[in-house]
Amino acid sequence: MAKNDIISVFCFDQEIGRLGFDENQQKSFFQYNPEFLQSEHFHNLFPSTGIFKRTPHVQVFSQFNSETFRGLPPMIADSLPDVFGNIIFKKWMEAANKEFSQISIIEQLAYVADRGMGALEYRPSKELPQSSSIDLTEIIAVLKEVLQAKDEQQETKLNHESLLNIFKIGSSAGGARPKILISEHKTSGEIIPGDLTYSSEFNHYLIKLHLDDELGYSREVVEFCYYLTAKHIGINMMPSKLIEQKHFATLRFDRQNGEKQHVLTATGLTGWDYQSPRNSSYENLFELALFLKVPHRDLEELFKRMVFNVVFFNSDDHLKNHSFIYHKNQDSWRISPAYDITYSLNPLLNYTRTSRALSINGKRIDITLADLLTIADSYTIKNAKNVVQEIQDSKSYWIDQAQQLNLPPRIIQSICKDFVRL
């Protein structure tokens, strides 16, 4: 390989295997650790969806060169932040006098290290030769420097000022909207940056920040209204709250009971590119859930989420916004709590037509009750009509919550006009 980039992949304190990347050929290479294979532990850690084969031989991946996967096996690409604009990565790039285009994908995984979402961790391979054209120790040194600064960043309570202070240090959370990870001590209320610990002594939050007061409303309050309504009808979501009536904070389901949880998106599990319409359908999500042998109640939960997203016009419910969580004691998978359920458009603008990220019964627009019931019939969803009716009846609940949280009337009206009557 041109650069001989190699990194070890760990999960639950075990080396699962090693990953390499050839930048000239834009190919990645993965090889399981033979001891991990022989142990038979976590046999279903990477389900056999046609990506990783459970073999001691080197596996080559040349088919994942899209913007979504960047040449990596999808289950590994899931670990990359959606954007690399946080301060740690910027600081390292500046120290190395490098442009982003010069940063290898293995260096980026070394940056993720043990700080990423989920349970996968990345450590420089001991076999990386000293003559390599990159120096992973460089990024590790800078990472330690910035993490030391993070250790010194402590606040006494969750409020707007303390959140902004931590935001200035950066975080491993990605996405187009500003997000940070924080950990709040359960007893003292002290908060620290959320990628430093997963101790059970803390509540671990992902917080979406409201930073644009000139917008005239808070998108985070809108999302909180969606959260309250989804919980009201029984959709499984992590406990969430508003901070100072403007920032949306949700407990992380990849940090529970003092342990990291292994989580993969539908895109990461399958290689279905969430930015491509080719495999972006709810039918594929249901088929994936069946393949993972989730309990039938998870299929019922997925149906309820699908209907909710249609009725409340969340058209951005793409494949990376649906995840599954691994239960290591049972070596099995379940659907994860729902997340990123909100109004995905700008209510200050007028839209003539909006296409859904996930098709339903082959359609991305003008979804009907018949389309939803076709899905229900295919996957044996009981009382589907009642589920649809209950969700439609909860529109008034959403309006009540929006009014109580002082969303501007024009914003409420603009969002409500897009709600779907089935």
Image (spheres, rainbow, N blue to C red):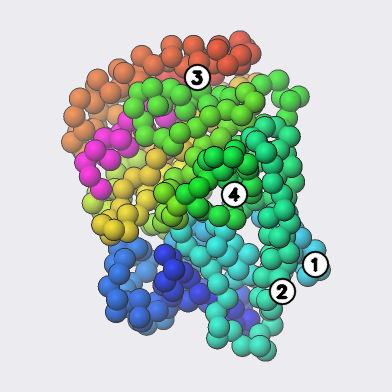
Asked whether residue 335 is in view, the answer is yes
Residue 253, image x, y percentages:
44, 45
Residue range highlighted in magenta: 294-316
For mark 1, what is the residue? 95
Queried whether the magenta region covers residue 163, the answer comes back as: no
For mark 2, what is the residue? 138
Residue 359, image x, y percentages:
39, 38
Depth check: give the residue in front, 254 or 281: 254
Hey, which quadrant is residue 185 in on the image? Answer: top right
Hey, which quadrant is residue 92 in on the image? Answer: bottom right
For mark 4, what is the residue? 194
Q: Is residue 133 above or below residue 245?
A: below
Label 2, label 1: how far apart the Cα atoms are: 9 Å
> Sequence order check: which comes first, mark 4 or mark 3?
4
User: Which amino acid type corresponds to the residue marked 1 in the rendered image?
Assistant: Ala
> Sequence order check: which comes first, mark 1 or mark 3?
1
